[in-house]
Amino acid sequence: MIRLIAAIDTKHGIARASQIPWDLPSDRAYFKAQTLKFGGNILMGHKTFSQLNNPLIGRTNYVASHLLISLPNGVALVNNLESFLNNFREDLWVIGGESIYAQTIGRAQELYLTTIESDFNCDQFFPNFNNFNLKSSNGPNKENNQTFYFEVFERS
C-alpha cells in the first residue's frame, strides 16, 4: 500500500524556500511513529533528503532523482520512479517533496495529513486530494501557538 504523509497549512502549503515553516514537535513524533509502521519503507525526493542530511533511522530510505547522485550507505537511489512504483511490492510511505507527492498521489491509498490552521505563505504545495475521504481525525491539538489535526484520508 502506498501512503503519503505530510503536514499542510490551510492552502496545502508544505514548505517555504525548501524549509518547513512551522515547529510542531508532536507532528515530528507522529511522523516518526507512523513511518516506522508497515515495514518502514520511505520514499522521498533528492531535495527532501538533502534537508534531512542523514537517512531516517529504522526505515529503508529510497531517494528519487533523475541525477546520478552519491548517497550514504543505507540509502537506495531510485532513478526511474515509475518503474520503482510498478515493481515495489511492500508498503511504502511517501514523505515529500512537492514533485514526489504529485507523482505518487494517483497511486496512494491513504493520506496521513497534519492539517495546520494557519497560512504560512508557502511556495511548495501538497497536491489536490479531492478523491479522498476523511477516515479519522484527532484534534484539535495545540502547540507553539498553532492549532492542528492529525487526519487520515482514504481513496474514495
Image (spheres, helix red, strand yellow):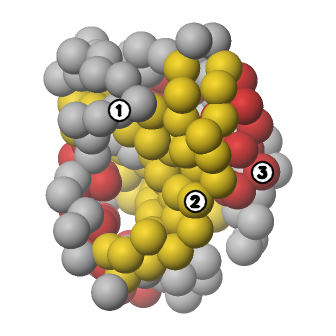
Q: Mark 2: which amino acid? A: Ser
Q: CA distance from mark 1 to mark 2?
A: 16 Å
Vertical relation: 156 (above or below) 16: below
Residue 89: tell me if it is visible: yes
Tell me the element at label 2: strand
Which of the two residues, 35 or 121, is positioned nearer the viewer here?
121
**9 to 109, vertically: above or below:** above
Q: Position of residue 16 (x, y in %)?
A: 28, 17
Give the distance between the C-alpha atoms of the residues marked 1 and 3, in whole angstroms: 21 Å
- The residue closer to the viewer here, 18 or 71, is 18
**Residue drawn 53% across and 65% down?**
152
In depth, the one of 81 and 152 nearer the eye is 152
Image marks 1 and 3: residues in contact by CB distance under 8 Å? no
| Disc 3: which residue | 33
Residue hosting label 2: 137
Question: At numbered mark 3, what does the secondary structure look like: helix, strand or loop?
Answer: helix
